[in-house]
Image (tube, helix red, strand yellow):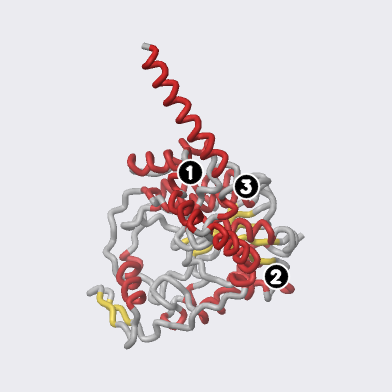
Amino acid sequence: MNGLRRALLTCVLAVAGVLALDGLLFHTGLYTSILEPDSSSGLYQLILHREQDAQKTWGDAMILTLGDSRFAYSPRLSNELTPETGYTFRSAGIAGSELRTWYYMLRDLDPTARRYRALVFGVNDYGDEDTLYFPDDDIRALHYAISSLRWSDALDFARSFHTPAIQRQAFLGVILKGIVLQSDVQAFLTHPLKRIAYVQLCRRGYEGWTYNYVDTATAMTGLEIDWPTMQAKFPPGSTEEQISTTTSWLLHPPSPQTGRLAAYRREWFGRIIDRYRGSRTKIIFARLPRGPIPRPAYLAQPTTSSIREFASRPNVLLCDESAFNSLERPEFFKDAWHLNREGIARFSPMLAKEIARMLGAPK
């Protein structure tokens, strides 16, 4: 019996030791300051750090945009209109992210929920169209937001996923962050000084690199789509990326409408909107340019529109759905998903003017 007690005590102490060590390293910010900048977790932390610094220097009339890589615009070009609009634009978007990740980014970036004049979310459509991609099961959110997740978030964060196996993975990952960051830690231990120097370099240079970034001039000029046959004619020299994104983004057949996207949006956009209730910050939704050749309406028949429902709340505004339709041309896209240099050059001032028009002059 004494042996069983000693074994149980040993197990309890071992578990407590693992939790204590994991908590010291990963729940205090001790390790997150040296995350690999090129990883999902490190990129998230780099953007968070950059935008926290920007809050100290960019004044009071700030507009923050959030989205994935499809929300391709240049804050620098938008801010060339600041003398006219009165607003400055900043971006906390992350390629490959989804709105659950944006919620945790905002929680750390704006703890008082009053720092920004508006939050602008770029969305593919105001309708809730289910596709073969289900954001409620995108485990990448765990890797992006790992530095922002707390022990108290574990159960709630895990429940936000749809599949039980992914729920378990998310729960364990929040409790023991070392599991999620294992490969990052191993890489750090291999070359610790090199990692530290690279993190310092990125923190010094990331603002300038991203703010002054100029995208490729590559275009899809000459693309044609025959919608009745769902066949695309690509211009000579089209890249594999252009062909694959056209196939997956534009030429996919309609998907069964399950309501999962609507439920996911109501949950996470709802949390963000509730968090800013009573704040001076407005929540703005903008429908992004849909592609070099937008899909016909009969191929997308969402049954609900959670975003239009949100528009009934006092702090929520919707951009005109057709505000950026003029950009839906092959010469403004580098692939079927993303605007190119010329598209961004046109979109950025259009976005700044549209948001300023909706908000009015800063007070």
Which secondary structure lies at badge 1? Answer: helix
Mark pair 2, 3: CA separation: 23 Å
Q: Which circle's residue, 3 or 1, is located before the other in the chain?
A: 1
Where is residue 20 drawn, in percent x and y?
53, 34
Kind of residue sitting beneath label 2: Thr
Residue 30: % across, % down? 60, 47
- Between tags 2 and 1, which lies in front? 1
Disc 2: which residue: 85
Of circles 3 and 1, the one toward us is 1
The residue that label 1 is drawn on is: 177
**Name of the residue lying farthest toward the top:** 1
Is the residue 213 above or below the residue 132 in the image? below
Give the camera-side residue of 154 and 271: 154
Q: Residue at x 63, y 61 (%)?
A: 50
Q: Quick one: quadrant of the N terminus?
A: top left
Q: Nearer the viewer, residue 161 or 297?
A: 161
- Can you tell which mark lies on residue 334? none
Query: Which residue is labeled 3 in the image?
Result: 276
